[in-house]
Amino acid sequence: MKLSLKTIALGAVVASMAVAAPIEKRETNASRITACFIGLVFTGAWPGSCQAAVAVNMGLIQSIAINQMTMDFTPADPWAPTTSSDSVVATMLSIPGLTLPITSIRQHIILIDNGVQIGNIETPWADASVSGSTLTTSFPTSTLGVFSDAHTAFSSFVGSISTKAEHPLTLRGSVDAKLNLGLLGTRTIPGIGFEAVVPMTGLNNLDPIEYKYLIDTNFDSPGFIYLTTIINIVNPSHLTLKLGDVAFDTAAASGRVGVSTIKDLALVPGDNYVMSATGLDMSLPASTDFLTNLSSADGVLTLTGFEGTSSDVALNAGLGAMTSKLVVPQNFEGSVMSQSPFKDWSLKTLPSTNTDRKVEITATFQSPYYGFPLEMVHATEPGMENFASVNNVSPTANSMRLFLFEDTLTYSVSGTGTVTVTFTATLGSLASSSKARWEEVIAYGSANGYVPVDFSWIANVIVNNDGISRYVDWNNFSTGLGDVNIAVGSDFASILNAFP
Ligand SMILES: *[C@@H]1O[C@H](CO)[C@@H](O)[C@H](O)[C@H]1NC(C)=O
Ligand SMILES: *[C@@H]1O[C@H](CO)[C@@H](O)[C@H](O)[C@H]1NC(C)=O
Ligand SMILES: *[C@@H]1O[C@H](CO)[C@@H](O)[C@H](O)[C@H]1NC(C)=O
């Protein structure tokens, strides 16, 4: 069996050599490389002439595609970002009748952009598999060492990747391959040369950026209004990037308005929901213009890289070339939460309810902010009136306050989780003038098992553990969520006993 395979394979090589003989030199090399690997697989032989044959740039490996690549620009040395890839596919010379039994490889790569060698990557050993002439592998986190005389060229490479849809990068170097030769054992063949132009997909300016939701408006810094917004940055590339804190100069139609900042920006291919803080500098006339115009039309913000885009010098020169548009909808309308901040409300009376108006509320909370964790710091604060008012019950009962929040509700919830909390709240007025309305609400509750309410609720929360206290508007209108039904039980009717 083994012998016949060998005969077939050798026969194929002889045939391909015969055809290749009169053609150009490269084909001759291909035949020699083919013969070398067939010799290796079937006899274990690897003479010096074979080592020389595979060392050439255009030898065994014909082309390379990087289907995914991660680049992390957050290491302290800006000229030593790290890279990794979970999918590198190399097309090798097709060797008739033979699949090379390569089990792992390590790579010594030199990156060449626009003819300039910009840096190198030395990868550790990583598993590889071969199917036909296709070799599939990956490489774990490895440092990309930018050459000291190539800083400018590297920044211009980052600029090209940031602003273009596609950018060709040349990879040159060699791989060391481990082959499992069965009875002949495992052999390592070092120094298999390659040179390939790899079409890298770029960020294409990350344009346009999608506006999703305005979390809050902050007036704490004199002269500035900070709008914190969830935006979706759609990354069209195969690159996963860790960029650290970035900032973009921001302009409206009539001029500059300030700077937009994104902390710890990390991008995966496809959708990336991130929190962006735009500081409107109110000393700039365009800022007032922009806010005024928002009441009658959408506002277009242009985000542009500038000298302060990143504190990473290698990245800054490149990202500085980016420019992208963000359309802020008129009155911030139409932008929606990813899900309701709350659900499953219920109300229970307590033994003391008819004297102190305290009731027990239970509800389930979740993050409405596109996967960002949320902490409720104050459900209400002195001087604020946060409450649930009756809606859609009857003309007389509607707008009556069912309960007022106290500062007793605190919780933390992950971006995707839920948390059910029971807390106390205070019923609306039980003065005798309210008796008729309560009768209607209680009749509705007894008949339906719930009371429909709208919230008027400005809560003090922290989003994404950033330590910034934000006043978020969770009223019925801002959330666009409609009525909330508060479940009530048979105890609800006992509230009527509070009235003489
Ligand atoms: C063929 O191999 C020789 C060395 O063995 C090398 O000098 C030459 O560049 C190769 N030709 C091609 C087209 O790769
Ligand atoms: C506001 O609207 C006016 C009139 O349409 C326009 O000329 C101006 O450029 C707008 N300003 C901004 C900042 O959008
Ligand atoms: C609450 O929101 C819903 C839907 O957004 C709306 O139909 C309803 O009129 C609102 N109620 C009040 C009192 O604003």
Image (cartoon, grey):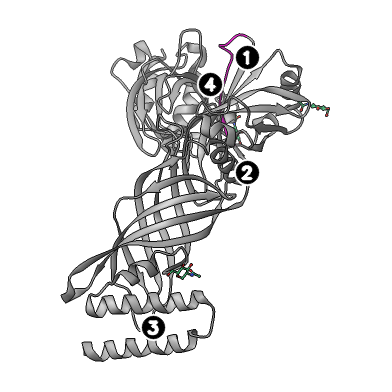
Looking at the rendered image, the disc whose residue lies closer to the viewer, 3 or 4, is 3
How far is mark 3 from mark 4, CA to CA?
A: 84 Å
Q: Amino acid at mark 4?
A: Met
Q: Secondary structure at mark 3?
A: loop
Looking at the rendered image, the disc whose residue lies closer to the viewer, 2 or 3, is 3
In the displayed structure image, the side of residue 153 where residue 195 appears, left or right: left
Range covered by the magenta-colored residues: 212-222
Cβ atoms under marks 1 and 2 closer than 8 Å: no
Look at mark 1 in the image and give the residue it sits on.
224
Looking at the rendered image, the disc whose residue lies closer to the viewer, 1 or 3, is 3
How far is mark 2 from mark 3, CA to CA?
A: 43 Å
How far is mark 1 from mark 2, CA to CA?
A: 30 Å
x, y (%) of residue 202?
57, 49
Q: Amino acid at mark 2?
A: Thr
Cβ atoms under marks 1 and 3 closer than 8 Å: no
Of marks 4 and 1, which one's residue comes earlier in the chain? 1
Q: Is residue 362 visible?
A: no
Of marks 2 and 3, which one's residue comes earlier in the chain? 3
How far is mark 1 from mark 3, CA to CA?
A: 70 Å
Looking at the rendered image, the disc whose residue lies closer to the viewer, 2 or 4, is 2
- Residue at the spot 73% in from the left edge and 28% down from the top edge: 252
User: How many callouts does the rendering have?
Assistant: 4
Check residue 163 in the rendering and tell me which mark sits there, or answer none.
Answer: 2
Q: Secondary structure at mark 1?
A: strand
- Residue at the spot 50% in from the left edge and 52% down from the top edge: 238
x, y (%) of residue 256?
72, 23
Q: Amino acid at mark 3?
A: Pro
How far is mark 2 from mark 4, CA to CA?
A: 56 Å
x, y (%) of residue 178?
27, 64
Of marks 1 and 3, which one's residue comes earlier in the chain? 3
